[in-house]
Image (cartoon, helix red, strand yellow):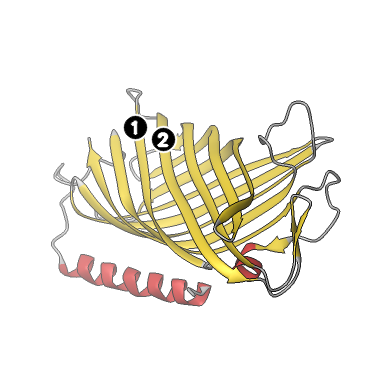
Amino acid sequence: MIGQKTVFRLLSILIICMLTIDGSAQRRSNSGQGQQSWDRLSLELGGYAANINSNFRLGLDNLGIGLDIDFEEALGLETTAFTFNANAKYRFSKNRRHAASFRYFDFNRKATKTLQAEIEINDRVFSAGTELGSSFGLSVINADYSYSFLMDDRMDINASFGFFVMPIKFSVSKNDQAAESTSFTAPLPALGLESGFILSPKFSLHQSVHLFYIQLNNLQGKMTDLSIKLEYRPIINLGLGTGFNTFAVDIQQSKTKRPLFGDLVGNIGYKHTGFLLYAVFYLQ
């Protein structure tokens, strides 16, 4: 299990290594040989190692009634996972203040465990001692439009609006036969605030936050997505980065004729906190 202290220690070590490399390397001059501050196109590809915590309460019409079941503790799903992560950003205006961005990652886990206590899923009770197979998958597809309201050669602060589309699948099986399952897609519009700072010709710091919240009679949904990243750019078209991200979503819905969250009846909560390593390719 990757603890938060371990993540911060690794980040510190990597930052120190990057600073050491940068100090020993020859810096670009200010005569035009250095990188352009904000590139037209960037493509980021990398890996994402995360701690995961998820819970559910399915099949209950009255929100807030009953006890949440912990996926990891009750069903034996791994608390850590590693996945591929992709980001792209395109600045499409002449002054580069307008931009479109896209992000994708997913986490899929499977497990088999003999239940230590009785659990209820979709009004079906599984007694202690029952061996259940389980799977839980979450994909996140995020598309944003952003506008940089503060921007110069070394700073970019922008506000964004976009959508997080999250297909979620959960199933349990008994004796290798499907017992209960639920799947739905959660479309969540979100507001965001992002910033980028060029610290030196080779280093830049990037932060972002995305938020969503809705509460109506039959549903409630909220999401937070926070990240901070440090990039080292050894050559003009290539950067190497490391960062920290936390993502959480909580969705509740009772039976309704016009469901926003598909066939979900009940509650699903999900959170992961992870460590990023990536390479980013730039076109000016």
Q: Residue furthest top?
A: 94
What kind of element bears circle 2? strand
Q: Seen in the image, is 29 located left or right of residue 123?
A: left
Distance from disc 1 to disc 2, alpha carbons, whole Å, reads 6 Å
For label 2, the crowd category at 10 Å Cα-Cα, with few meaning under 14, some 14 to 19 and many 20 or more, is: some
Residue 177: x and y in percent read: 57, 54
Name the foreground residue: 3 vs 5.
3
Location of the C terminus (image quadrant)? top left
For label 1, the crowd category at 10 Å Cα-Cα, with few meaning under 14, some 14 to 19 and many 20 or more, is: some
Residue 149: x and y in percent read: 49, 33
Which residue is tagged 1?
90
At horizontal 67% and vertical 71% (from top left) the residue drawn is 115
> How many numbered discs?
2
Q: Which mark is residue 19?
A: none
Residue 15 seen: yes
Name the foreground residue: 271 vs 239.
271
Amino acid identity at mark 2: Ser
Residue 71: x and y in percent read: 63, 63
At horizontal 52% and vertical 51% (from top left) the residue drawn is 137
Which residue is tagged 2?
101
Amino acid identity at mark 1: Tyr
Residues at marks 1 and 2 touching, judged by CB atoms closer than 8 Å = yes
In the depicted structure, whether residue 33 falls above or below residue 115: above
Residue 204: x and y in percent read: 34, 53
Name the foreground residue: 177 vs 218.
177
Instruction: Specify which label sits upstream in the sequence, 1 or 2.
Output: 1
